Image (cartoon, grey):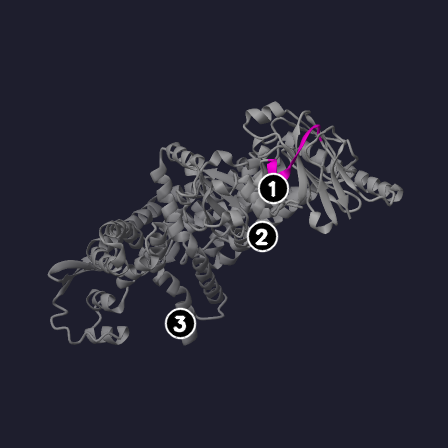
Amino acid sequence: MAESRASQIISAIGGAQNVKTLTHCATRLRFELFDNSKVDQKRMEAIKGVLGAVAQSGNRYQVVIGGAVATVYEEVMELPEMAGRAGGTVKSRETETNADVKAEAHAKGKSKNAWVNSFFEYLSDSFRPILAVLLGASLFIALINLLISINVIDGSETSTGLVFIEAIWKGVFYFLPIMIAYNAAKKLKVDPWLGGAIMGMLMTPQFMSMFLGKGKGISLTAVSAVTGVDLTSLRGWSDAISCVPNKALGTQICTAKVFGLPMILNDYSGNVFVPLLMAAVLALVYKGLNKIIPESVQIVFVPFLCMVIVGALSAYLIGPLGVFAGNYLGIGLAWLNHYVPFVLAIIIPMLYPFLVPLGLHWPLNALMLLNLNTLGYDFIQGPMGTWNFACFGATAGVLYLSIRDKDKDMRQLSLGALLAGLLGGVSEPSLYGIHLRYKKIYSRMLPGCAAGGVTIAVLGWLFPSVVKGAAVHGVTANGFAFTSLLTIPIFNQVWVYAISIAVAFCVAMFGIIFFDYRTPEEKAALKSDTAAGSIQTASTATATATATATATATATTVVAAPICGHVVSLDDAGDPVFASRALGEGVGIQPTSSTVVSPVAGTLRTVAETGHAFGIATDDGVEVLVHVGIDTVQMNGDGFTVAVVNGQRVNVGDTLVAVDFDKVKEAGHSTTTLITVTNTAALGSVTPQIGKDVQAGDPVLDIVH
């Protein structure tokens, strides 16, 4: 019986006992493990449906699935052994073994920069869950820009329909701080609704009315009408707020006296820095209060005191500090883009290929949102797009070669990755599924990144875009988007952006086509595999036809011993999975020889690359599993010399694998070889013959159909 995809993933990860937590994002399963060294990387990458896998510091491990990640996540979490390991739930000390605790302690000492890893994880987990709505909003922006550019709608119109459409996407960015506060609080193991509520306080009509009224020169009556809050009875309201101009931003800085203390008023809509800072402070206060307040009243007083303490800190200190830092960081980046645009336009696409695999690109995503909030536009996404399209161009080159070389597996993989990139702007399927597996791809792709960056830098300098009446060098975007074909209209100077990404795409694609992405050995192996596959297909077909023509009507009545040794019950074999009969009835053999042979005549349906397991189907439908040793998959084939291939026809006594059992013992694994009939339930009976010494070929299981 074939092992499910979910079971294969968990087995390759080192078993459920090695999983500390499991979450997923748009394309990846994200594991936190107790010990990364237990992962079988080769086996993981060979699993059908796994596009790639990468180990990270701090015992983090990512398995790239692609668009089906949510389905695979559910399949994994439905496994009985995975109960209690979802979404940040850490396994309790009571259920950990001594080995788990030891592995965790070792894991803590492995990374000297654990705080850096935690910081980037904090950023990524604060933004990752809302990427879908950000991308959905960006498509609205792209669609509106496209309709304006082809004169379907007038950009100056203020029809109710256009206002409603704008409200759909503007609502996402306006309430972005609340979403980020929720995710950030959840990441820090604080009640996420508390984080969202405190951030929401700074965005209520009551709070915003002070800023709108004085800071923007709007009358008190007008503010009351817009917000629905009656402020006309506030005596001295106008005098209580003072404003001074901010020449750098072209705005005013307004201060109000609240309880006798000065409070700087800000518009927090769309801000990303403030909720990140607020959640960090909230985590300290929340956990501190939980330590000193009795459990019986925590549900009431902890949220109350958090709202009072952190709410006040956010209004008086955290909010203004976050806005100040964000504004001036945006101004600094804008200055850099204005005076040395070549630096950003070239460095960004050259850095992204190295940042994305490490998950270090999230700060740049935060800066994009910061630019949109402070400047009203962003200049990072244009150069980033040249990297994305260089990545997709390299994948297109791989697709071309796979079609030319009749490489069916690579053709399917590269086509799916290319479509995900061009239509969704997602680079992970290309990156993890193809690029990081072949060392030469980066040397072909990076010239595309550089060419696209130079193109956007030169054209952006020669033909600056006009934003808010001022010339801005480089391509700018007026919304947050994953750079794909569908989001091209979101950029100003569309023609400059289109030429730049086309250059990046073509240079990378032709670099792959002309210079290939494989070493001579890899190309030779492909040709050998293709030829062998053709021969094997023909040979299997011939053998099957011959067997069908010559086979007698005699059914399989016995399963022979695949190795010499002493026969024991599955209950005594030392593996609880086999003992449960989940893989069918069978026996274990404690070996006295080193050659494992076929116990039945039939066709090999499974040949583990590590040589530890073989599945054989007889002509009359009996399915037999031979499993050499227990947990020997962890040896990665060391000590196993496989003599057969998948799909091969075998007879009783044909050699399957030669095993160095001394190495198996040295590695700390049991040598007991297990033989089961995996489709026992479909047969009349399967009766083990235990408690005897056997030679290879002696009967150990009696079968009745």
Between the residue at mark 2 and the residue at mark 1, the CA separation in whole angstroms equals 46 Å
Label at residue 544 = none
Label 1 crowd (10 A; few <14 / some 14-19 / many >=20): some
Q: Which amino acid does label 3 sit on?
A: Val
In depth, the one of 512 and 521 nearer the eye is: 521
Q: Residue at x 46, y 36 (%)?
A: 35
Q: Which amino acid does label 2 sit on?
A: Leu
Label at residue 163 = 3
Task: Tell me which label, 2 or 3, sits earlier in the chain.
Answer: 3
The x and y percentages for residue 674 are 65, 36
**In terms of secondary structure, where does tag 3 sit?**
helix
Circles 2, 1 touching at the beta carbon (< 8 Å): no
Q: Name the residue under label 1.
A: 579
Q: Is residue 412 above or below residue 526?
A: below
- Left or right, 207 with respect to 567, comes to left
Label 2 vs label 1, nearer the camera = 1
In depth, the one of 231 and 192 nearer the eye is: 192
Label 2 crowd (10 A; few <14 / some 14-19 / many >=20): some
**In terms of secondary structure, where does tag 1 sit?**
helix
Label 2 vs label 3, nearer the camera = 2
Between the residue at mark 1 and the residue at mark 3, the CA separation in whole angstroms equals 66 Å
Q: Name the residue under label 2.
A: 419
Between the residue at mark 2 and the residue at mark 3, the CA separation in whole angstroms equals 33 Å
Label 3 crowd (10 A; few <14 / some 14-19 / many >=20): few
The x and y percentages for residue 81 are 52, 47
Task: Tell me which label, 1 or 3, sits earlier in the chain.
Answer: 3
Q: Is residue 7 above or below residue 154?
A: above
In depth, the one of 119 and 384 nearer the eye is: 119
Q: Toward which corner of the image does residue 129 lie, by quadrant?
A: bottom left
User: Which range is magenta?
Assistant: 563-573
